[in-house]
Image (spheres, helix red, strand yellow):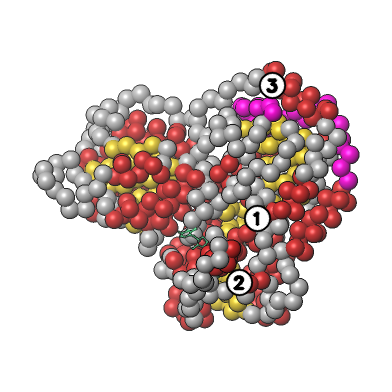
Amino acid sequence: MPSDGTRVPVADVLARSIKGAGVRMAFGHPGGEVVVLIDALQRHGVPFLLTHHEATAAFMALGHGEYTGIPGVCVATLGPGATNLVTGVASGLLERAPLVALTGALSTAAPSGTTHQALDLNALMQPVTKSSAEVTAVTARAAIDEALRISITPRRGSAHLSLPANVAVEPVRDDGALTQTEPDQRPEPDRDALDQAREVLRHAQRPAVIVGINAVQSGAAQAVRVLARTLRAPVATLPKAKGVMPEDDPLFLGTLEMAGDDLVVDFLKDADALVVVGVDPVEFDKPWRLSAPVVFVDEVPNTERYVPASVELVGDVPRLIGSLAEGQEASTWSEPAIRERRRAIWDHIRPQGSRLHPRDVVAAVREALPRNAIATSDVGAHKMLVGQAWAAHEPRTFFMANGLSSMGYGIPVAAAIRLIDDSHPVVAFVGDGGLSMYLGELETLVRAGVDILIVVFADRSLELIRRAQLRREVPIGGVSFENPDFTALGRAFGIHVAEVATPDELARALPALIHAAGVRLLAAAIDGDDYRF
Ligand SMILES: Cc1ncc(C[n+]2csc(CCOP(=O)(O)OP(=O)(O)O)c2C)c(N)n1
Ligand SMILES: [Mg+2]
């Protein structure tokens, strides 16, 4: 292979750029059209993990992206491989995860009129990505570098490339100048806006801080903590920003949009100014309910206008927050009042009297795991509970589907994170509906040697949807099902399983589950009726 790279096959050029971007591993499910690409990835030092369903591969790539900030890569074949991939790729877009999806495509040399497995893959992927393009021998280098760059440019998300099987083996015809692989430059902050924002805070008696996902992705956690402590301001987070403020900090108020959210919002109504940091409207299912003036700080402009901003600071978030904090004084908020509200939220989400409440499960698992444990949540009634009850103390230790909010996210994201970084224990909280959707992936996890605790809330119900039926006063139906025999699943997949139905059984089962290696499943029989939002 010549050193100037002019004769390098297209698949190798893609693999080399992917390796160069820091991608740790790729996830996928092959077809004949992508075997050359997968081989190239592996030869260039990007191991490939086979999943049983392409969506799982995309969720794993998403986990790689959300955790490391470096795009995750997933691979699928053309036709059904690409259509199966769509849900995970769309999740990358709306979960704001850097992700590059690669699919095969029909050979450009296929006889005209070939329709077998032929779909317009770029048209398929266009609405669920930031960009989708077909790779040619001329554009290969620019296309992969552009896909990688687009995926890490705020707002982060998915990019897709389709690679015709014959093009993969063609030598590139333009391996020349590298395109920019860094994200686009952030705009310079507007000095007048900064002065205005500082004035808003200087006149406020009770400023509060609301934090969203871009505070995590822009590395602003430390700056937010300093600002909050300087102002002595309560901090509420959106679910994907949990951990920006340690949740045992006296200033931590609660998580918005999750169970008990009304109590968080109600407290914030007493604020006379809000600093809203990196908040992406994708996480909101409810309208903005606060009327205090808003200082909006983000990497990207407030284009959706979901947040009614009085002043907008757009640019380098940690620096902007640092400038905002300078010279500010402590507010008149009382820390005991914040603590009392936290207690009220904690009490609210668990009504008295149930045998084993989901909050008890989250609390017991939290207590059994160290401070740096990483948790993920899937989607359903349990997510509303976990998002409020799980205490995250550092950024990037809690991951939840809260953009596309697709079932199937929890387990693959936790597994990918653990494969990339084995220094934190990981736990995935999932519903029984979500678990059954991709049950076959337990084999993937066992084969990959993932150390992971899966906690399944076994209520034999799509509980969140049952609640929707109750709310909309339609007959209950099409939302209940039977679960597999979880203990037998343990034998089938070779995993450690414990089934619990009471707090005592939970306490007895937990130590062994926490300390065992490999895939462990805790099936907690709970009553879906017990969730309180
Ligand atoms: C892929 C996908 N299909 C459907 C939905 C709609 N949905 C949201 S929550 C939910 C129920 C999930 O059931 P389960 O996993 O058992 O969680 P639970 O609500 O019982 O806690 C459904 C069907 C979704 N979010 N994602
Ligand atoms: Mg359920």
User: Which residue was labeled with disc 3?
Assistant: 193
Q: Which residue is mark 2?
A: 528
Whether the residue under disc 2 has CB within 8 Å of ligand 1: yes
Q: Residue at x 65, y 34 (%)?
A: 308
Q: Is residue 520 above or below residue 220?
A: below
* Residue toward you, 481 or 149: 481
Question: What are the residue bounds of the magenta stretch?
Answer: 310-334
Tag 3: residue type? Ala
* Callout 3: SS: helix
Rendered image quadrant of residue 187: top right
- Real-space CA distance between mark 1 and mark 3, rounded to the nearest whole angstrom: 32 Å
453 relative position to 102: left or right: right
Amino acid identity at mark 2: Gly
Q: Is residue 135 visible?
A: yes
Residue to which mark 1 is pinned: 258
Badge 3 local density, few (<14 within 10 Å), some, or many (20+)? some
Residue occupying image coordinates x 81% and y 54%: 341
Give the quarter of the image for residue 100: top left
Disc nearest the viewer among 2 and 3: 2
Q: Which comes sooner in the sequence, label 2 or label 3?
A: 3
- Could you tell me the amino acid type at mark 1? Met
Relative horizontal placement of residue 310, taking residue 457 as reference (left or right) = right
Residue nearest the viewer, comparing 200 with 435: 200
224 inside magenta stretch: no
At numbered mark 2, what does the secondary structure look like: helix, strand or loop? helix
Q: Residue at x 58, y 46 (%)?
A: 283
User: Distance between the Cα atoms at labels 2 and 3?
Assistant: 48 Å
Residue closest to the far front: 473
Real-space Cα distance between discs 1 and 2? 16 Å
Q: Position of residue 103 (x, y in %)?
A: 31, 47
